[in-house]
Amino acid sequence: MDIGEGFPRLLREWRHKRRWSQLDLALTSGVSQRHISFLESARSNPSRTMILQLSEALEVPLRERNHWLTAAGYAPLFKSRDLDDPQMAQVMGAVRMMLTAHEPYPALALDRAWNVLLSNRPFDRLGTILGTMLGADIWERVGGGPRNLMRLFFHPQGVRPFVTNWSVVGPLLWQRAEREAHDLGGAEMQAVLDGLAPFQDPEILWSASEAALLPVVPFTIAAGEQRISMFAVVATFGTAQDVTTDELRIETMFPADGETEALFRAMAS
C-alpha cells in the first residue's frame, strides 16, 4: 500500500468514525492540529510513536493499529495469538474462571464477529433446550461453521420466530452489531451482517419501540410449554495488548424472571 494513500486515509477514516474534528483530535492526543493536517494530507510522514499516540487517542482496536503501522511502512506491533498459545494461558484461565463462576446461568466468550469461542455448561444446556425446541441441528441450519449468535438470532431458521418480543430485541441487537462493526472496524462482523441482511425487515430493525421504558430488555423465547427470558451483560479486557485478547467479549446471561431462574437452577441440580 502506498504510504501517501494508506496512512492518511486511515487517519481520516477513523477520525470521521469518532466524529471528531482535527482540533478535537489535537486536544485529545496532544499533537498540534497543524501536524495532524499535514499527516492527513501526506505532507508529513508519521513516526511509529506518532501512529501509536494518535491511534490510542482515537481508541482504535489493536488489529486496526497494526494496519496503520503497515500502511505507514512499519512492522505490526500487536500479536494475534491462538487461544491455546502458552502466552494466553493466564488470560484463558481468567475467562474460564468467569464462565464457571457464573453458573448456574449461561455465559460465553465471543470474538468480534460474535462467534462462540468458549462457553460454560449452562450455555451448552441452553443449546440443548433450543435444540429440543427448534431442532437438534440448529447451528448447522443457521449457517454451519462456528457457532455464531447473530446467525442464531437473525437467520430465518434460527430462534427469531420464537422470540416473543422480537420488535424490541431485534432492533437493539442489530444496531449493537452494526455499531460494533463500525466503531471497531469489524470486517468480520460486517460480513455476517451482509449475509443476514436479505432476510431482515428494515421497518422492524429500525423501528422505534418501547425499549427505553425498561432498565434492560430481555429476550424471551417461547415454544410450546417452554419459556426462557434472559438479559445479557458484556465485559471486555481493559488492558489488552494482544489482538485476540482485545477482541474477546465475555457475555454473561441472567434470568429475567423467576421461571427462568428456577429452570437453570433445576438443570444444575
Image (cartoon, helix red, strand yellow):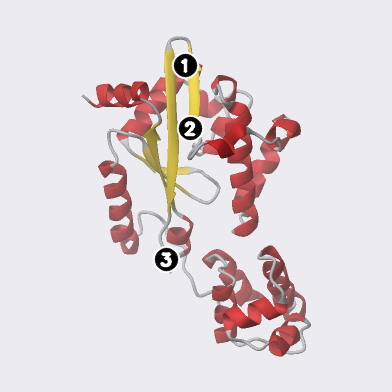
Residue at image location 36% in from the left, 24% down from the top:
260
Which residue is the site of mark 1? Answer: 133
Is 40 in front, or is 163? 163
Tell me which amino acid carries mark 2. Pro
**How crowded is the residue under tag 3: few (<14 C-alpha within 10 Å), some, or many (20+)?**
some
Out of 155 and 262, give the one closest to the viewer: 262
Whole-percent x, y for residue 47 in the image: 60, 88
Q: Residue furthest top?
A: 224
SS class, disc 1: helix
Instruction: Say whether disc 3 or disc 2 marks the residue closer to the N-terminus.
Output: 2
Give the labeled residue for mark 3: 240
- In the figure, 220 relative to 28: above or below? above
Please, what is the three-letter code of the amino acid marked with disc 1?
Met
First of labels 3, 1 by sequence position: 1
Q: Position of residue 109 (x, y in %)?
A: 41, 46
Q: Nearer the viewer, mark 3 or mark 2?
A: 2
How far is disc 3 from disc 1 in space, using C-alphas?
39 Å
User: Where does the C terminus fall, quadrant-wise?
Assistant: top left
Q: Residue at x 37, y 40 (%)?
A: 107
Above or below: residue 55 compared with residue 86: below
Q: Which residue is mark 2?
A: 218
**In terms of secondary structure, where does tag 2 sit?**
loop
| Residue in the foreground of this view, choosing between 156 and 34 | 34
